[in-house]
Image: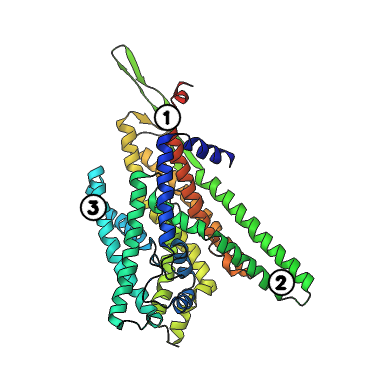
Amino acid sequence: MKGVFDTLVNAFRLPDLRKKLLFTLFILGLYMVGGLIPCPGINRTEFTSIVSNWGQIGSLMDIIAGGGLYAATIFAMGITPYINSSIIIQLLTVAIPALENMAKEGEEGQKKLQKLTRYMTVGLAVLQASFFTYATRSAMTSYLPKPLTTALIILTFTAGTCFVVFLGERINEKGIGNGVSLIIFAGIVTRIPEMARMLYYDALNIAGKFKNAALGNTIGVIAFLLVTLVSLATIIFCVFVQNAERRIPVQYSKKVIGRKVYGGQNTYIPLKVNQSSVMPVIFTMSFLSLPSTIVTFFFSNSKNVIVEWFRNFGSSPFYYVAYFFCIFLFVFFYSMIQFNPIEISQNLQKNGGFIPGVRPGRPTSEFIAKVANRLNWCDACFLCIVVLVPTLLGKLTGMEGVWFAGTSVLIMTGVANDLVDQIESQMVTHNYKGFLD
């Protein structure tokens, strides 16, 4: 922790970095202010009561939106459509050769993919805003004709998402860190006091269930402290695993050119344990929440047995079993589309590198793939522990508000690690003494 604060203090001493950090803080401040502006045409109290019944998917969307969903602000959808469109473009890049060739074109290709992502973001934002408006149609105000109110709400939600994407891209251009990730990070950090308040009231509810007030207060305090300690342990565990890596040793053969000898150095290929970050968790939550979300949007008043089962699926034991297996499935799936051991093996062979004890070519790619698959098992177990333990702890203690702690911690620690790495890498370029040492 001391090293992180030292890095920030040293960063503010450099004019260029200080300017980037202040610009990033200014953009995040604009995002926070915008998150306080209410959306016109909505009865906030009724909208919040409807959305709060959407279960975990609604709570996750509210966290990503920085509390804007439950507050019915112009940023109610947050950056969710952009995240979904980015994921879709990544998947299509693997499936469609034209997009795959575009991704290999370098900076120009990335700009084209970014443009496609923006267009898809607008389309998904309109679609999601339409679903939101339809599902919460009873919360509309009657000051304007209903068609005009519907169009106004859809336009406001869509424009809010586009503006948030614009703020994120300005951070990428003139600030420091990943703009979209920092906006999500800021939304989660601003919710920490609210999370602490919910845990406090959950502890009071536990204490109120006992006739003996002293015993109830003691158990409530113990439950609150237990959840706090588990949260701190989860943060430490996440930071440790996210920084962990498996280093595959690589040796480069020597080349004699004229009178000089080139190469011959030893290095390594760093494979992160948590290669997929929080993406499998987001995939899993979106996939498992889709049936209940459809039921909530379109069959909210139905009393059918099947509809009721899907509506309450998030609280059944089958949900957690499916959650466990889906995380494993999506970890391996995400690794398959993002990690290419054949390309790594070919690059090593072109540069005269080899892994000691492994023949170049196909045996090298198979060895790297085997190591990556073993790490995927560790990654999946890590994500299951971080996400499911807080949820089960909340069920056992009656503190239901703790379920989102795992996902929030994963996002916060991942973004914080990435930000510190970027700051340190830019500081190295200003500190030439380090190269001399």
Q: Is residue 7 left or right of residue 87?
A: right
Seen at 35% across and 47% down, the residue is 172
- Give whichever of discs 1 and 2 has the lower sequence position: 2
128 vs 266, left or right, is: left
Q: Residue furthest front?
A: 143
Which of the image's four quarters has the N terminus?
Answer: top right
Helix, strand or loop under label 3 = helix
Element type where label 2 sits in the image: helix
Which of the 4 image quadrants contains residue 41?
bottom left
The circle on residue 99 is 3
The correct choice, above or below, for 278 with respect to 419 in the image is below
- Say which mark, if any, is on residue 430: 1
Residue 397: tell me if it is visible: no
Residue found at the very far bottom of the displayed protein? 303
The x, y position of residue 204, in whole percent, is: 68, 70
Q: CA distance from mark 3 to mark 2?
A: 57 Å
Task: Using the image, tell me which numbered label, if any, was put on residue 207.
Answer: 2
Looking at the rendered structure, the kind of residue marked 1 is: His
Amino acid bearing label 2: Ala
How many marks overall? 3
Going from N to C along the chain, the mark reached first, 1 or 3, is: 3
Q: Residue at x 41, y 30 (%)?
A: 429
Residue 32 seen in the current view: yes
Position in image of residue 11 (x %, y %):
47, 37
